[in-house]
Image: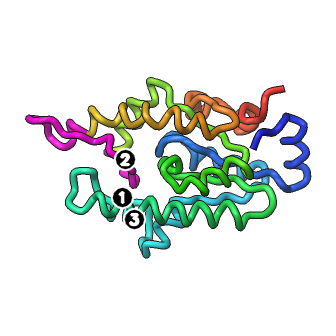
Amino acid sequence: MHLSRDEFERRYADNALRIALVGMSNIGKSYTGMRIATSFAFDLIEVDKLIWEALGQSSMADFAAWQGQPYSEGYAEREAKSIALESEATAKAITSTSGNAILDTTGSVIYTDKGVQEKLVSDWYIVHIAASPEAVSLLKEQYFKHPKPLIWNGHFTCKAGQTSDEAIMECYPDLLASRAKAYADLADVTIESDLILDPEQTIETIFEALKPPR
């Protein structure tokens, strides 16, 4: 949803502003969404939570364990089911929301049904949190420390002589690169992860940065 700065401010004042955060898992969408919701009176919708609840899981860790790694037996089937559930959950979230709302999308929102993405683009102001080179290294570390369900979409390969973990470490940056353009194509504005992850930045500064340029 392309908005001018004045339209953004007017929608916010009228309790009719919808913001969707897109970007890789662990890039700071959930934390930023929570901060904005708390400080600026937005309803926060977490799509990951809708998915793992639909699966009957009780936590993100359980969801990640269910989906497994791309080398796990049955991963392709679970990946396909996860995308289908994500399409359903995202569609429900973007069509049943009223008032000022912030949508914490999954990292794989770019793989949801085309119609879902089109509805998101038409009805929501989309903010892409872009991963800096330094953030890519941090994301790789966090992927192993705090696993989240991850859609590889064919970007995982394991070469002869590689361990599974070595293959993931090598393929992960390629996955990030492949997603970066897709996120940017969806977005109305892109902000750098360095801003989001800087502990000295206030949420007021971050909220100002995601607004349309003057």
From this view, report whether residue 31 is shown above or below residue 49: above
Q: How many C-alpha atoms fall within 10 Å of the one at disc 2: few (<14), some, or many (≥20)?
A: few
Distance from the alpha carbon under mark 2 to that under mark 3: 13 Å
Asked if disc 1 and disc 2 are in contact, CB closer than 8 Å, the reply is yes
Point out residue 155 in the picture as x, y percentages from the top left corner: 32, 40
Point out residue 101 in the picture as x, y percentages from the top left corner: 73, 56
Count of labels in the image: 3
- Disc 2 marks a residue whose amino acid type is Asn
| Residue 63 belongs to the span the image colors magenta | no
Q: Residue furthest top?
A: 133
Point out residue 162 in the picture as x, y percentages from the top left corner: 13, 36
Q: Main secondary structure of the magenta part?
A: loop
Q: Residue furthest front?
A: 115
From this view, report whether residue 169 is shown above or below residue 31: above
Query: Which residue is labeled 2 in the image?
Result: 153
Asked if disc 3 and disc 1 are in contact, CB closer than 8 Å, the reply is yes
Q: Which residues are magenta?
A: 144-167
Marking on residue 81: 3
Residue at 67% x, 58% y: name it: 44
- Disc 1 marks a residue whose amino acid type is Glu
Distance from the alpha carbon under mark 1 to that under mark 2: 8 Å
Query: Which residue is labeled 1 in the image?
Result: 79
Residue at 59% x, 28% y: name it: 192
The residue lying toward the viewer, choosing from 149 and 174, is: 174
The residue lying toward the viewer, choosing from 47 and 77, is: 77
Q: How many C-alpha atoms fall within 10 Å of the one at disc 1: few (<14), some, or many (≥20)?
A: many
Left or right: where does residue 62 sit relative to residue 120? left
